[in-house]
Structures are given as C-alpha cells and as structure tokens.
Amino acid sequence: MNGISSSGGGAGSARRGRGRRIVLWRHGQTAWNLERRFQGSTDIELTEAGVAQARRAARLLASLNPDAIVASDLKRAAATAGELAGVTGIDISYDAALRETYAGAWQGLTHEEIIGRYGDQYAAWKRGEPVRRGGGELETEVADRAAPVVLHHADKLPDDGTLVVVSHGGTIRTTIGRLLGLESQHWESLGGLTNCCWSVLGEGARGWRLLEHNAGTLPEPVLGDDT
C-alpha cells in the first residue's frame, strides 16, 4: 500500500475514535463531459449548468459545517470549490496533486475514439490491470500523489471535524480505494461519480469507512445493525 495507512493519522488515531469525516466532491459539468471526451489533466472550465450544480451542492455541503476545503487547482475543480468557500467563508487550499489522471494521448478523445484506437488498452484497464492509458499515469501513481494530500489535511482536523476535498472522478475513486485499503485491481468496483456528487469517508475503529458514495443529497445516519 506504499506506506499509506488507511486510518489516516495512523492506527493509534483510529483507535482513539476521533470521528473525522472526509467528503470527496467531484467538480461540476464541463463541455467535455457532455461530449464524452476524456479530460484528464486538460484544464477545462465549468459550463453554466456546471456552475449551477456547484452552487446547489455547496448550499447542501455547507450545512455539514466543514472545517477545511482542499481542491485541485484545475479550473473546473477550483470553481466548484469556490462556491462552497463563498457560502462558508473558508479559505481553499489548492494542490496540484489532486488533479485528474494524466492520460496522454487519450486526453481530448471521445469514448468512441478511445475504443476505436486503444481498444485493447481500454479493455485491460477495465479488467483492473495496471495500464498507462495513452502513455500517462498509472492509477496507483495517482493514488500515490493524491491520498497523502488528503490524509495530511484530514490529520489537521479537530475531533469530529469535516474535510471537503474537491477533485475529479478518477482521482477520487483511486484515493477512496487507497484509503479503504483495497487492492488496486478492485478500485474499478467503486462506481463513478456524477458531476457535483460526492462520497463520504468516516473514521471508524479500524480506519476509514465508505459511508456514502455518489451522493447528491446530505448524508444520513445509518440506522440498523451495521452502524
């Protein structure tokens, strides 16, 4: 697991039950999303609809009383984070390590073009094999750069504090997989995030747990035996 502890601040902090929470929020809609183009690290802005999505979601997430916001420095993530900062008054920490996966020659291509030109590579990626899509980054390399940033900011939270991480679908998925301690070939089992939806990790006795995934409404307590 490349030295990353799934408990965030180490096993000791998890056992202390600090109850921290990480909200991983995907950016709003872009024109390339609509065209089904692979964005990767290409710096694409939000559409008007994307701004509206971010504004609506920000009002919901603000009610969680977040303690900190950290975001990718790409325009689509930064603008999304800006809506939450505007509501909460919290300063944003930007970090290039939270950018989307660099995918080389795939970037800018539509889904159909990728299948047509790189079908074998695409199929291997979907099987969970380590693939440098378009000559770009491995998913494990994305987790190597992103997960430590998330843990660093989570470690600075007060007990029961909430961190909002504004990033990109692929980066969020690999980061969740790493923090949950899943082997990389199983990360694909985590479904994708819709524009401006989020996933929530909560700190439990044995480390980070996935509490909500691809949510568009406020998280609610789990009522039942598996709490």
Image (tube, rainbow, N blue to C red):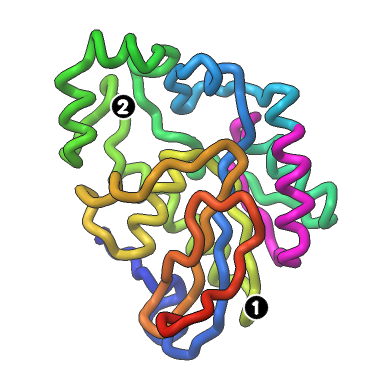
Query: Residue 179 got which mark?
Result: none
> Which region shows up in magenta?
52-76
Label 2 sits on a secondary structure element that is loop
Query: Residue 158 got which mark?
Result: 1
Q: Is residue 124 above or below residue 135?
A: below
Residue 157 coordinates in the image, percent (x, y)? 62, 72
User: Image quadrant of residue 62?
Assistant: bottom right
Horizontal arrangement in the rendering, residue 208 relative to residue 155 (left or right) = left
User: Image quadrant of residue 192?
Assistant: top left
Residue 222 coordinates in the image, percent (x, y)? 52, 75
Instruction: In this rendered view, identify the residue nearer to me: 43 or 96.
Output: 43
Residue, disc 2: 136
- Residue occupying the point 20% across, 17% down: 119
Which residue is outermost to the bottom? 16
Q: For residue 57: magenta?
A: yes
- Residue occupying the point 35% across, 20% down: 104
Q: For residue 157: magenta?
A: no
- Residue occupying the point 63% across, 45% down: 94
Q: Is residue 225 above or below residue 51?
A: below
